[in-house]
Amino acid sequence: MRADAARAAKPLNYQEVYNAIAEALDNSDYDDGSYGPVLVRLAWHAAGTYDKNTGTGGSNGATMRFNPESAHGANAGLSVARDLLEPIKKRFPQISYSDLWSLAGVVAIQEMGGPTIPWRPGRKDADTSAACTPDGRLPDASQAHDHLRNIFYRMGFNDQEIVALAGAHALGRCHTDRSGYEGPWTFSPTTFSNSYFKLLLSERWVDKKWSGPKQAVDKATGSLMMLPADLALINDRVFKKHVAEYAKDENKFFADFAAAFKKLEELGVPFPENAPTLTFNRAAA
Ligand code: HEM
Ligand SMILES: N=NC(=O)c1ccncc1
């Protein structure tokens, strides 16, 4: 039997897939040295299209493989993440793209020092672009708190979960050639922490003076940024209460983020009855 056929016949060891993704993360020539943040963004965008009212969208299907979804402005730059995972798909052909992309989000968060996130396999890929979701399902960075609630309530999240999920902006950066915005939110963009919440409250945020879209920079150094949608979290009384809680208690943030991200990754997925819930530790294999 050919090696790839033999591999395809072997039951999938998800820890091996986890380890292969973890080994692909670090690259000193890319952004801040890791593909972790863009993998988290891929997993979130693949899942964040879910509409609880129609049961459409979500991580099941991996419809971002197809036009028009791959070309949606909100998904600009995510081909970097999809292309990074392609060799791992070839090495482990039994895993669906849907499961691979969602697992990659868990690997990235855990390997960047974030909480352990239980993960279930069982997503199935869509065969055609017919399942592509319409544009506009993901949040618009230029908007404020009402828009955030419309987008996330549609997925089935509450205010506390919205704030916890936004804490992923501790990671990575904005790119002028992707969203048009520029810069990182924190001084540690490849470490998962509660620093996004601490900086939201500790820094004086002033309008960036440039020709790009409206965004804020920290007055002290000018090297950090916040989107209008980020600042909405401290301009709304209820959101701000959760920001303050997470700025004070990183363990609470980690626990709430893990629960909300698991919920995000499982939105609308028709898991098989016997789908196991797995937790991963890179040392194991
Ligand atoms: C709350 C509403 C949100 C808005 C308006 C928003 C908007 C954005 C924008 C405009 C970017 C920059 C994209 C680029 O230019 O590369 C970005 C990056 C990012 N977002 Fe969000 N986002 C939101 C929520 C989330 C959530 C819920 C997560 C994950 C749970 C997330 C994870 C990320 C990550 C990790 C990056 C950095 C990606 C990289 O470094 O390449 N965001 N976000
Ligand atoms: N995390 N969210 C994003 O990356 C994003 C959301 C909407 N529009 C552009 C980018």
Image (cartoon, rainbow, N blue to C red):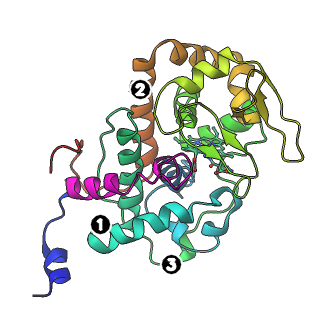
* Viewer-nearest of discs 3 and 2: 2
Q: Mark 3 points at which residue?
A: 128
> Within the displayed image, which quadrant is ligand 1 positioned in?
top right
Q: Distance between the residues labelled 1 and 3?
A: 18 Å
Q: Name the residue under label 2.
A: 254
User: Is 45 on the left-hand or right-hand side of 228?
Assistant: left
User: Is 11 on the left-hand or right-hand side of 242?
Assistant: left
- Using a 10 Å C-alpha cutoff, classify the residue at mark 1 as few (fewer than 14 neighbours), some (14 to 19) or many (20 or more): many
Q: Please state the extent of the stretch shown in magenta in the rendering.
A: 14-39
User: Is 241 on the left-hand or right-hand side of 283?
Assistant: right
**Residue 233 locus on image (x, y percent):** 68, 25
Q: Does the magenta stretch include residue 16?
A: yes
Q: Residue furthest bottom?
A: 1
Q: Residue 95 carries which label?
A: 1
Closer to the camera, 258 or 264? Answer: 258
Closer to the camera, 106 or 62? Answer: 106
**Residue 125 locus on image (x, y percent):** 40, 69
